[in-house]
Image: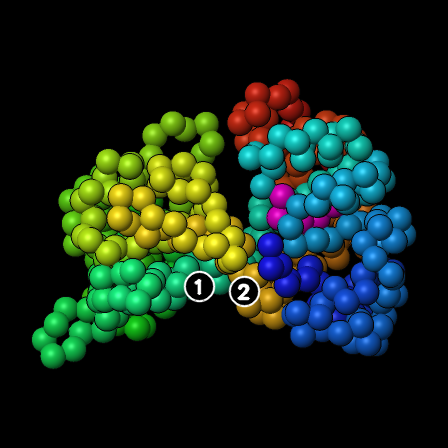
Amino acid sequence: MQEGRVALLPAHVARLVRAGARLFVERGAGRHAGADDRAYEAAGATILADGPAVFAAAEMIVKVKEPMQTELPGLRADHILVANLYCGRDRALVDHLLAAGTTAIAAEHAHPHHPGNSPIAGELGALEGLHLLFRPHGGNGRHFMRHAGMQGARALVIGLGLAGRGALRVLLNLGVGVTGIDEDEAALARALSDWSNRDFATARPAALPDLLGQADLVINCVRWDKSRRDHLITRDMLGLLPRGAVIVDVACDRAGAIETSVPTSWENPTYQVAGITHFCVENLPAAVPPVASATFADVAAAIAAPVATFGLDAAMHDQPWLAAAVVCRHGRLHDRRTATLQERPWVPFAG
């Protein structure tokens, strides 16, 4: 995994402690994020020996990612779990959450005021894609900037949400020519306004077959609905790309928007299909744990603070955006998307 992020930094812990919460932190949890145990203790947290000790002591469990297999037995009916869960693609996890009666809040659906790690994922995906274009890494050797009359690299960014906008920031500021692709008219208009002084154009997904032939780098930031059987870029369409082109799939959905995508890890980040290098690392932000922890902690604290202070029901009443992030509670599934993808019964969350 090479996961170095931590869900809350000492500054966030201090705010929660001032609000009246008791905080337990696993020993060494923040070491890769630049936060040692002494900083957590100074913020008011109690350091516990390991994860099981934290699960046993706490009522709310705040994590960056979903519980590991070894952690699942520690979940209880009185637990409120806050994490990036992506339950739609993990039936086994949903089975455990429902059986335990745990209240699960999907952090990825609960950030109306904080972007979380998505922009960082787009930024890192863009950097890795440009790196892979270099000849020693099997790319076509295209430089990202124009020199001596030679055209610089050209990229397609598919999906202009938070991750896509992160990719645009890196690519366009480095001088790469980019076409941004989205179905949403507002997203296209915003991107054109933001980057009117750069080599930037927009298009709809229907134009992809015509655009791939000039693309050195394709960055996909569209999370694909698991119920769909179609793709934005099929295996057959890989032949349209120039030799030595690179696909970076930030969304990392197996056979999702990119039919040939298979999630990879930092240990083995790339593979080739039809001569096209694919980079599909699942946890891109884990490469920069200090900043990724800070941006995720903003989201986690925004969820945890009202729940810890007022209780779940009152927090949902005062801040309705939280209700949309509740996956399950007391053995009942409340997330419609997860229910649809897994063909399960569900009920709307009513607090």
Percent position (x, y) of residue 288? Answer: 55, 68
Task: Say left or right for 68 vs 143.
Answer: right
Label ID, residue 287 = 2
* SS majority, magenta: strand
Percent position (x, y) of residue 191? Answer: 31, 59
- Near-viewer residue (264 or 337): 264
- Near-viewer residue (150 or 202): 150
Label ID, residue 45 = none
- Residue beneath the point at 64% across and 24% down: 346
User: Label 2 sits on what residue type?
Assistant: Ala
Task: Say left or right for 210 vs 166.
Answer: left
- Residue beneath the point at 27% across and 43% down: 274
Task: Say left or right for 349 vs 151.
Answer: right
Q: Residues within 10 Å of mark 1 (few under 14, many from 20)?
A: many
- Residue at the far left: name it: 149
- Residue at the far bottom: name it: 148
- Residue beneath the point at 56% across and 58% down: 116
Percent position (x, y) of residue 351? Answer: 74, 35
- Label 1 element class: helix
**Numbered range of the magenta stretch:** 81-85
| Image position of 62 with respect to 342: above or below | below
> Given contact means CB atoms under 8 Å apart, are the residues at marks 2 and 1 in contact?
yes
- Residue beneath the point at 23% across and 39% down: 237
Task: State yes or no: residue 255 in magenta.
Answer: no
The alpha-carbon separation of the residues under discs 2 and 1 comes to: 9 Å
| Image position of 114 with respect to 223: above or below | below
Residue 214 in view here:
yes
Q: Quadrant of the N terminus?
A: bottom right
Task: Say left or right for 153 vs 170.
Answer: left
User: Label 1 sits on what residue type?
Assistant: Leu
Percent position (x, y) of residue 74? Answer: 83, 42
- Near-viewer residue (129 or 160): 129
